[in-house]
Amino acid sequence: MPRSVFLVANPAAGHGRAAKLLPAVRRAFAGIGAPKPLVTRGPGDEARCVWEALDAGADTIAILGGDGTLSKATGALLAARAGDRCRVLMLPGGSGNDFISTLAMRSRAWVEMAKLAVDGVATPVDCARIDGRHVLNVGGFGFDVAALRTLQRLGALGRLAGNALRYKLAAAKHIFGFRPLRADLDDGLGERELLLVAIANGRRYGGGILVAPNASVDDGMLDVVSIEDAPATERIALFQTAQTGAHIARDGVAVRREARVTLRFDAPPAFQIDGELHQSKRSEIVAESVPGALRVITGPAVATPAIPGLPRSAASSAAASRSTGRP
C-alpha cells in the first residue's frame, strides 16, 4: 500500500540551522508526494504538528530538528498511542544531532532520505521514562543540570559557538565550584556524593560527549552512569575523557545496565531530559526503559560498536569492582 508520509519541522532547531535546510528537505519530500510540511510555531509546538499528521492519516512522520525536537515529537507520538503504528524518520537539523548519531543516520542526502521514508525498514527502538516523563536520549542529574542552566544564559556568545563548544564553555564554569549531590542509586552502596548520574538510552549528548559509550537503543535496558565526587584535577580529566567515552574506565565511575532503577535523593532534585530542565516534586525518582516504543527507520545498523579496548562486559565489571572493592 502507498505510504502516507508527513514532514514535521522545527525551523528554530540548531539556532536556525533547520530553517536553512527546510527548503531542500521540503522539495525532496514533495517528490514522494508528502504534503506541505507541518512547521512548529514556537517551543513545544511539535505535539500539535504530530497530532495533525496523525489526524490526517500519517503512517510515517519525518522529523527535521535537533535532539529536543525529536524528543518532543516522539513523546507526542507515544502520548497518542501511535508508536507501534506510525513509523519515524529522523532528519538531522540540530546543532549536535546526538541521538541520530547512535542510529547511524546523519545523512543530509535529502532525496535519499525521502525515499527511505517510503521504502526504508523500521526497527523497534527503545525510549525511557524518568519521573514519568518521556526520554528519547539521555537524562541527567547533578553536573548536567548546572551546565545546562549556564548554557541557557550564554546568550549571543552561545549562539556564535558550535554546540560542543557551547557545552564546554558552560561546563568549564562548574569544574571547580560544583557542589556534589547526595543520592542512593539502588546499587547496595548507600547514599554518597556524586558529580553526575546519567540515565542513558542513547550514547551521546551535549554535542558529542560519549557519556554511555556502550549503550544500545534496542536492548530494553538503560545504562546508568554514575561519577563520584573527585578533586578538581580529576574532574578535568573526567570531562576530557568523556569526549571519547574513556571516562568509564576511570576510578569512581560506574556503569550499570538496568531495565528499571530507583534513585533516592536527600531532596527533590532538578534534572534534565534531552536538554530540557525539570524539577521533581519527589525525592525518589524512578527511571525505566520502554522497550521497542518506537518504530524508527534506521541506517545500516542501529547501534555503533563499543569503543576499542573496552568491551561492554569489561566496562561494567571494572566499574563495579572499584565501587565494591571486590575483584
Image: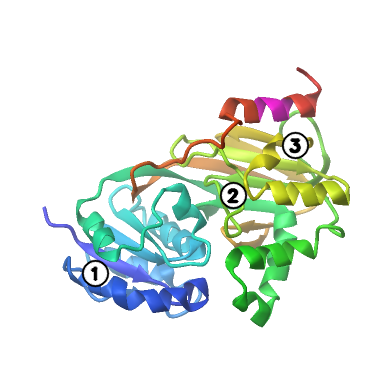
Report the side of 4 relative to 70 (left or right). Answer: left
Q: Name the residue under label 1.
A: 28
Taken as a whole, is the magenta stretch helix, strand or loop? helix
In depth, the one of 213 and 309 nearer the eye is: 309
Report the side of 190 relative to 309 (left or right). Answer: right
Residue, x 56% and y 41% (percent of image)? 288
Please determine whether, in this image, residue 325 is positioned above or below residue 258.
Answer: above
The disc labelled 3 sits on which kind of residue? Arg
Question: Nearer the N terminus, badge 1 or badge 2?
Answer: 1
> Which residue occupies the extreme front position in the image?
308
Q: Which of the 4 quarters of the picture holds residue 292?
A: top left
Residue 130: mark in rendering: 2
Whether residue 188 is visible, yes or no, is yes
> Which residue occupies the extreme left position in the image?
1
Mark 1 element type: helix
Quarter of the image where the C terminus is located:
top right
In magenta stretch: residue 319:
yes
